[in-house]
Image (cartoon, rainbow, N blue to C red):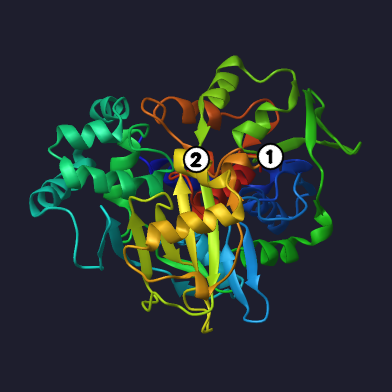
Amino acid sequence: MKRREFIQRSAFAAAALAAQPAFAIAKKPKVIVIGAGFSGLAAAYELHQKSYDYVVLESRNRIGGRVFSHMLDERENLVVELGAEWVGESHTRIRQLCEEMRLPLDNNQMDTHLIYANRYHRNGEWGYSEQWKTKFDQLKKGYSSLSVAEKNKLDQMDWWRFLNENGCDGFDLRIHELNDTTDFGETIRQISALAALSEYALSSVKNEMDFKIRGGNSMLAKKIAERIAMEKIILNCTVTKIVQDHSGVAVFCSNGQQFKADKLICTMPTFAMSRVEWSPLLPEEKRDAMHALQYARINKNPILFSTRFWKDENFDLLTDMPAHYFYHATKNQRSQKGALTSYTVGDKADVVGNQSDHERWSLVQLSLQAGFDSLAPLFEKQVNYNWGEDIFSKGAYAVYRPGQWTSLQKVLRKHFMHTHFAGEHLADWQGFMEGAINTGEEAAHALM
């Protein structure tokens, strides 16, 4: 199945269900939604619009899940994202919701600079070789003509191996490693070549790093919650047990609360899902798939400076130093002050996330010193969030390794008894708010 085919087919199926005569459903089921991230909120909003009875249970003390906007400077009204960052050009559903909720989208495209081997290269002064760019364009254009068998074979290979065997080597391959890990969440030696090539072939020019919601991406979570009413969302309610039988489903929470319904939409990441006691047990193949799927280790470290010394509002920077990738996190927010976020992935995220604030700041200065003078006088403060240590997800977003895209997802997507599943790990592309929303809406339609 092509990436994107899943969403298109699901949308078609949802439309077919909606077209059924009213007498096809004698009674609307009562529904429990687990998770108030974008997937759970999207599911709840669909149920709300169709007048279903539902409740949303959320383990965290806030809504939004892995969308996590943070006010870095209240006086200057500077907001950064500790979680999901970008809305893509092709992300039609989240853009529709933002328009419906009257949330403006600001351009968030970047022009990438590079520090490599202790030399600073401005945007436009570096890039892939002409030979590799020509070859890579051919590979991307050829994706649409691949047969199912060819895609299945491609899924068995890692992205590093695929690039190397197609003539990418030396500087070109090292830049792919630096650049692509920021997209896929782990080293390219662990990423399915099918997942990687399809994203490159089907995404926007800026690889879906196009927009951000004005005021913070959490604004959309807030607006949806206002539409469905916050009293329908119960926070600090960690699900510990799910019981299903012929009469419906019962959900038990660590705070002693219990809920009963006819249907369940589970949007938990697989780590949290595997911690729940299921009765009866989930099918063995689903449990195995849950245990096999890994999530990206990503550490986000926004740093506030008294002035935007990088000058360019569209500034981002790849580096082979420990801080890995920087981007202007306060683009389009009016102030003399500004923030750069150091975004580290995989093993680097583990290292940076384990340091003290003082040590993280030292790593940032070390990583930028080839391009900029002493930054110490400009430093104001920093925050840090290590998604690899998040107690609910143990990672930022799902990472499909070689052989997993064509095997795991179809198993994880299957409903079980009264339970339908959703979440970014079941989406067309992992790591985007769009995918979480799509799967939440699809799960809601599936039980209507």
Above-or-below relation of 155 to 70 = above
Give the structural element (helix, strand or loop) at label 2.
loop
Where, by quadrant of the figure, is residue 216 drawn?
A: bottom right
Where, by quadrant of the figure, is residue 160 drawn?
A: top left
Given residues 97 and 302, the one toward you in this image is 302
Q: What is the C-alpha distance between the residues marked 1 and 2?
A: 14 Å
Could you say which disc has been placed on residue 365 in the image? none
Residue 132: image x %, image y %?
Answer: 12, 48
Given residues 371 and 247, the one toward you in this image is 371
The residue carrying mark 1 is 391
In the picture, the quarter occupied by the C terminus is: top right
The residue carrying mark 2 is 296
Give the structural element (helix, strand or loop) at label 1.
loop
Residue 433: image x %, image y %?
Answer: 53, 54
Which residue is painted at 74% across and 66% down in the image? 226
Above-or-below relation of 77 to 169 = below
Residue 318: image x %, image y %?
Answer: 34, 57
Which residue is painted at 40% across and 65% down in the image? 210
Q: Is residue 122 visible?
A: yes
Given residues 369 and 445, the one toward you in this image is 369
Q: Amino acid at mark 1?
A: Ile
Given residues 25 and 270, the one toward you in this image is 270
